[in-house]
Amino acid sequence: MFKFDIIIDEFPKDRELKTKRRKAARGVIFYQGKLLMVKTSMGDYKFPGGGIAKGEDGNLALKREIEEETGYTDVTVGPLLGQAFEQNSDIFYENIMFQMDSDYYLCFLNSLETKAQKLEGYESDLEFTPVFVSVGEAYESNRSLLDNKKGLVLECSNVKGMTVNEWAMRETTALKYLLESYVDKILPEIYVCGQMMKNADRSVLEVDDKAGHANFVTNYDKMIQGELKKRLLAVYPGALFIGEEDDSEASDSDIESDRFAFIVDPIDGTTNFMKDYRQSCISVGLTYGGELVAGVVYKPYSEEMICAEKGKGAFCNGKPIHVSNSDLDHALVSFGTAPYYEELRRKSFEKAEEFCARCIDVRRSGSAAIDLCNVAQGRVDLYFEYRICPWDIAAGSIIVTEAGGKISQTDGRPITLKEKCSILATNGITTMI
């Protein structure tokens, strides 16, 4: 999630100006690892999108603008990715300050269906052309134009003398955030794989047993993991990929090596998925040098994309999330039963009963990643489980800490991503009893 201001002109101190403020929606549209953008005759790249009329639905307005500017018609508008605020003197009226709030939405091109563009005014004069371009290429091109101040004054029939600096600065800044973000690069790939879960054909569902009590794997676990591996390694070539269905644990040297490592559960909540319980998700943690740097949990049934980067906070669909401030007496507690390890069943339920006597109530979701996100979002106040795998907790752990919560093992030791361990996630106020 990015947020920035572009202030071209300040309000003068010697006179009052009226303010004209508009809202805009812009699409960050990924397709096969590249962005669908509009290239102008000036050589700069802009995100498709534009102004939203008063009372107009933002998603519909964005889809309309994308269709008109690029011709592509089969677009899904996803979660909010970033926001920009611009301020500059109005080019038409001397005593007006123009302000624009732009919301950038993660969008997905479902197919290459197109129709003729519908360009008007400066869009036609600037020969808006839809192109697929890498984030890096678009950024470098825009940056070069801004640095050289070359060709950045529009000589269009309806806005003669208007500068393109404003939107070039805005779009270049947004591209820079995308270039530097761990999370934004992988969200589109995770979204596509989540749709495989959401739209699964249950008539062809196949289930196999794995080691441990009630431990299952489906053909969709395997298919989604394969697709995630292909897509994520295309974004981060050379990264290590540790997935649940590889049935392996990472060695110290693997995790702590000087490279990125994805720790992935393709369907966290497989039993829920089998039963169509609709409490399953994709969990993707990203480490570098053994340290968690980012995490994404995508819940396709509720369309919640929950993510965090180290030092940047945690977000759900682009909006900041934070843990609650409830103490134990006012807490809702969730727990996992460590179902694959029958020797921990009694211990888990005895502890849950202890909590039930002290807190408001207890819950069991069937997905560790969802439980962790519920703590991060303040929906529950504490979650514990006595044995859990690294891919179940990698993404959720950094989401909790970036949302202001605390993560440890149930005995207070730090969690590990190298082998199975226990986990305790809290809001920092409610504690283990």
Image (cartoon, rainbow, N blue to C red):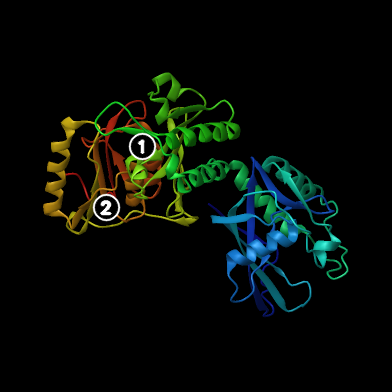
- Badge 2 marks a residue whose secondary structure is loop
Q: Earlier in the sequence, mark 1 or mark 2?
A: 2
Which quadrant of the view contains residue 349? top left
Which quadrant of the view contains residue 164? bottom right
Q: Give me the residue at 46% from left, 45% from top.
A: 200
Where is mark 1, residue-wise? Answer: 392
Q: Is residue 126 left or right of residue 13?
A: right
Image quarter of the C terminus: top left
Mark 1 belongs to which amino acid? Answer: Asp
- Residue 357's x, y, as percent? 11, 53
Query: In this picture, is 2 found above or below 179?
Result: below
CB-based contact (under 8 Å), mark 1 and mark 2: no
- Badge 1 marks a residue whose secondary structure is helix
> Residue 253 got which mark?
none
Q: Give me the residue at 61% from left, 46% from top.
A: 178
- Residue 176's x, y, as percent? 64, 46
Where is mark 2, residue-wise? Answer: 381
Q: Is residue 185 left or right of residue 369?
A: right
Q: CA distance from mark 1 to mark 2?
A: 19 Å
Residue located farthest toward the front when viewing the structure as drawn: 203
Q: Give me the residue at 53% from left, 52% from top.
A: 1
Q: Residues within 10 Å of mark 1 (few under 14, many from 20)?
A: many
